[in-house]
Amino acid sequence: MFLGMQAALYYQAKTVAIAAAQQGARAAGAEHGREADGVGAANDFLAEAGGDDVITATSTSANRTATTATVTVSGFSLSVIPGWKVRITQSASVPVEQVTAP
């Protein structure tokens, strides 16, 4: 029973982490987006999705090049097994939006 609950908590935290990374990557990859925009968007998503009630000790980083924006979200899933922490790291990348002349 505890193993099933642990699996559900892990899956939920992993799903929230990848969704936050995707949200952040979209913000960082916008035409005038910056790395800070990506980190902010990912952190806002994490807070709205439950914050520490879903994934704890989160850290968010972003990297934007001329062609690609990447956001990485890391943290730990909640645990019903004392002393057992499962680390989660999820990344998302998108192409940077560029306006070109016709």
Image: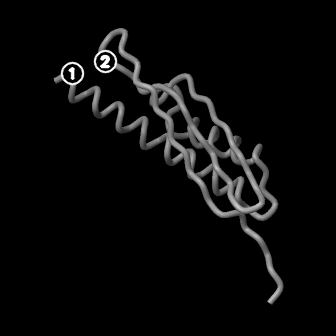
Q: Please give the name of the residue rendered at 56% of the width and 22% of the height, measured from the top-left corner.
A: 57
Which residue carries the number 1 mark?
2
Q: Quadrant of the C terminus?
A: bottom right
Q: Give percent across and percent down for residue 80.
A: 31, 18
**Mark nearer the N terminus (1 vs 2):** 1
Q: Quadrant of the N terminus?
A: top left
Decide: marks 1, 2 in contact (CB < 8 A)? yes
Q: Is disc 1 surrounded by few (<14), some (14 to 19) or many (20+) residues within 10 Å?
A: few
Q: Please give the name of the residue rendered at 56% of the width and 51% of the height, measured from the top-left corner.
A: 92
Q: Give percent across and percent down for residue 87.
A: 45, 26
Q: Residue furthest front?
A: 66
**Which element is circle 2 on?**
loop
Asked if residue 97 is positioned above or below residue 12 in the image, the reply reads: below
Q: Residue furthest top?
A: 83
How many numbered badges does the structure rendering display? 2
Q: Please give the name of the residue rendered at 49% of the width and 45% of the height, measured from the top-left corner.
A: 18
The amino acid at mark 1 is Phe
Q: Please give the name of the residue rendered at 71% of the width and 46% of the height, measured from the top-left corner.
A: 63
The amino acid at mark 2 is Val
Q: Quadrant of residue 45?
A: top right
**Which element is circle 1 on?**
helix
**Disc 1 and disc 2: Cα gap in Å?**
7 Å
Asked if residue 12 is positioned above or below residue 79 in the image, the reply reads: below
Q: Quadrant of residue 6?
A: top left
Which residue carries the number 2 mark?
80
Asked if residue 46 is positioned above or below residue 5 in the image, the reply reads: below
Q: Is disc 2 surrounded by few (<14), some (14 to 19) or many (20+) residues within 10 Å?
A: some
Q: Would residue 72 be found to the left or right of residue 13 on screen?
A: right
